[in-house]
C-alpha cells in the first residue's frame, strides 16, 4: 500500500486476515483495496479538481476490477472449480451495478460518491472473506497449484 496517505485518507487498510493464500490473487486484492482508498480520498476532497480525479479513479477502478475478475475466473476455469458459475454471477452483478452508478455519476444524476466507495469496500471485503476463501479452500483440498 502507498505511504502517501495519512490515516484519515484511508477507508480500509489491508490486513493479512484478508489473504487467501494465493499470492497473485492476494496482490490483486491489495490493489483493489488501494483503488478503493484512492476513490475515497478523491470523493473526500470535494473540489472541482477532485471531481475530475474521482472520474479518473473510478474508471481505473472499473478497469482493474474487470481485469481482476477475468484473471480470477480464468484460474477457476483451469482448476474446474465447481462453484464457478455462482462466482461469475457475483462478479457480473457487481460490474453491472458499478457501471450503472458510473453512468449516473457521469450524467449528473443522483450519486453519492462516499456511499458508493463504502459499498464497494464492503462488497470487496465480503466477497474475499466468503467466496474467494471458498475457492482457496477447494484448491488446498484438491492440491491445485497456480
Image (spheres, grey):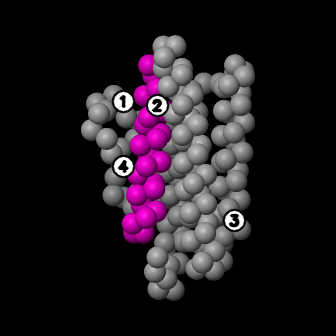
Magenta span includes 33? yes
Q: Are marks 1 and 2 in contact (CB under 8 Å)?
A: yes
Q: Which residue is mark 4?
A: 14
Furthest residue to the top? 48
**Marks 1 and 3, the one that precedes in the sequence:** 1
Helix, strand or loop for disc 2: helix
Q: Which residue is mark 3?
A: 86
**Marks 4 and 3, the one that precedes in the sequence:** 4
Q: Which residue is mark 1?
A: 9
Q: Are marks 2 and 4 in contact (CB under 8 Å)?
A: no
Q: Which residue is mark 2?
A: 40
**Marks 2 and 3, the one that precedes in the sequence:** 2
The structure residue drawn at horizontal position 58% and vertical position 37%, both measured from the top left corner, is 59
* Quarter occupied by residue 1: top left
How far, Cα to Cα, is label 1 from label 2?
7 Å
**Marks 2 and 4, the one that precedes in the sequence:** 4
The structure residue drawn at horizontal position 41% and vertical position 43%, both measured from the top left corner, is 34
Could you classify mark 3 by the number of other residues whose Cα lies within 10 Å: few (under 14), some (14-19), or many (20 or more)?
Answer: few
Percent position of residue 48, x then y? 52, 13
Furthest residue to the bottom? 142
Q: Which residues are magenta?
A: 20-46
Helix, strand or loop for disc 1: helix
Helix, strand or loop for disc 3: helix
Report whether residue 31 is seen.
yes
Could you classify mark 2 by the number of other residues whose Cα lies within 10 Å: few (under 14), some (14-19), or many (20 or more)?
Answer: many
Q: Is residue 18 above or below residue 63?
A: below
**Marks 1 and 4, the one that precedes in the sequence:** 1
Percent position of residue 35, x then y? 46, 41
Amino acid at each position: 500500500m502507498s505511504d502517501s496517505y495519512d490515516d484519515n485518507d484511508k477507508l480500509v487498510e489491508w490486513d493479512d486476515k484478508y489473504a487467501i493464500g494465493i499470492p497473485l490473487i492476494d496482490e490483486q486484492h491489495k490493489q483493489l483495496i488501494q483503488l478503493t482508498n484512492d476513490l475515497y480520498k478523491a470523493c473526500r476532497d470535494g473540489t472541482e479538481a477532485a471531481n475530475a480525479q474521482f472520474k479518473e479513479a473510478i474508471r481505473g477502478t472499473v478497469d482493474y476490477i474487470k481485469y481482476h475478475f477475468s484473471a480470477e475466473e480464468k484460474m477457476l476455469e483451469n482448476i474446474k472449480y465447481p462453484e464457478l458459475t455462482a462466482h461469475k454471477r457475483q462478479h457480473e452483478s457487481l460490474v453491472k451495478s458499478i457501471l450503472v452508478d458510473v453512468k449516473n455519476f457521469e450524467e449528473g444524476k443522483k450519486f453519492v460518491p462516499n456511499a458508493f466507495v463504502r459499498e464497494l469496500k464492503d462488497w470487496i471485503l465480503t466477497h474475499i472473506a466468503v467466496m474467494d476463501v471458498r475457492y482457496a479452500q477447494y484448491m488446498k483440498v484438491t492440491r491445485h497449484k497456480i
